[in-house]
Amino acid sequence: MKVIASGLQFPEGPISMPDGSVLLVEIARQTLTRVRPDGRTEIVAQVPGGPNGAAMGPGGKVFICNNGGFNWVREGQTFRPHGQADSYDGGRIEVVDTANGRVERLYDRCGEHALKGPNDLVFDGQGGFWFTDHGKRRDRDMDRGYVFWAREDGSEIREVIGGLFAPNGIGLSPDGRTLYVAETDSGRLWCWDVTGPGTVAKAPWPSPNGGRLVVGVGGYRRFDSLAISASGQICIAALDTCSVMEISPDGSRVVPHTVPDMLVTNICFGGQDLRTAYVTMSHEGRLCEMAWHEPGLALAYG
């Protein structure tokens, strides 16, 4: 493992770029930042609120799940989020033009319902993307979580899955036929069969959300964002366990890969043959790279 950059302010949403750099968000700094291979950083765009998950979209633009902001606990050089920001002004999906840093709002509601805390997203290669709405936490209550599907041109958004408890990471199987969603606090990974753009088949009651449980790892293990490998393994940043959990599609195999940080938040694949894993270590504000034992899955927009 190699630490590429440090001093980041709660990094998330890494995107491997063809030139060897990594784009990521700094949630506490409220920026989209480029990390060069030698560790140099530069701000690509100011993104007020809580830029969270990020993915490369059409036209070389970066789509960002903006959770609206957190309050923060800062201890020395470390960061951890603490509930809905006092300055919270709503969740939204935003698009950043990396050429000029311009930020445009694409969605901030679905029908009569405002987005609360969009967290992570994945493009389906059919003109749309799936994203989780983690919701927001307050001192005495918290929001229910949802999964939405939206067209990348801003023309349509639909609520697809409800009844989730803090949904976070989201990904698609290599054939695009299975949608995976990780819940943070339950440490559970769910899946649904994708039946078309923005539609899934739902299991009957007693499934609480229409999904099939892939795995619940037990103990105090929370899940954050995820990436899929070329063979279909689900690789989930596992927060307090100081690891990335590699989980087989049927849940029969769970392999932890150690990462030295209390808040491992995300992973993406890049480099030659997509065999390099870039991991955000958010508690201490670092980005690391590590050789992976197989290629990652090529994403819709690289």
Image: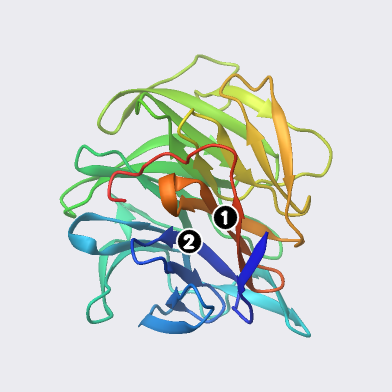
Q: Position of residue 104 (x, y in %)?
A: 24, 71
Q: Would you say 123 lies left or right of 220 here?
A: left
- Residue 147 image position (x, y, % from top left): 43, 41
> Which residue is at a point 48% across and 28% down the rendered structure image?
231
Q: Tell me the quarter of the picture where residue 128 sits.
A: top left
Q: Give the residue displayed 44% in from the left and 54% down from the top.
A: 271
Image x and y of residue 111, in percent: 27, 49
User: What is the secondary structure assignment of the residue under circle 2?
Assistant: strand
Q: Secondary structure at mark 1?
A: strand
Identify the amino acid type marked 2: Pro
From the image, tell me which residue sits under label 1: 266
Residue name at image x 42 percent, y 45 percent: 273
Disc 1/disc 2 C-alpha distance (Å):
7 Å
Q: Is residue 119 visible?
A: yes
Above or below 138: residue 75 = below
Residue 44 falls in image quadrant: bottom left
Viewer-nearest residue: 135 or 73:
73
**Number of marks in picture:** 2
How does the figure colour the protein chain or chains?
rainbow
Mark with earlier residue (1, 2): 2
- The residue labelled by disc 2 is 14
Closer to us: 125 or 160:
125
Near-viewer residue (215 or 8): 8
Residue 165 visible in the displayed image = no
Q: Amino acid at mark 1?
A: Asn
Q: Is residue 18 left or right of residue 163?
A: left
Side of 67 where 149 appears, left or right: left
Q: Residues within 10 Å of mark 1 (few under 14, many from 20)?
A: many
Is 171 placed left or right of 134 in the picture? left
Query: Mark 1 touching mark 2, by CB under 8 A?
Result: yes
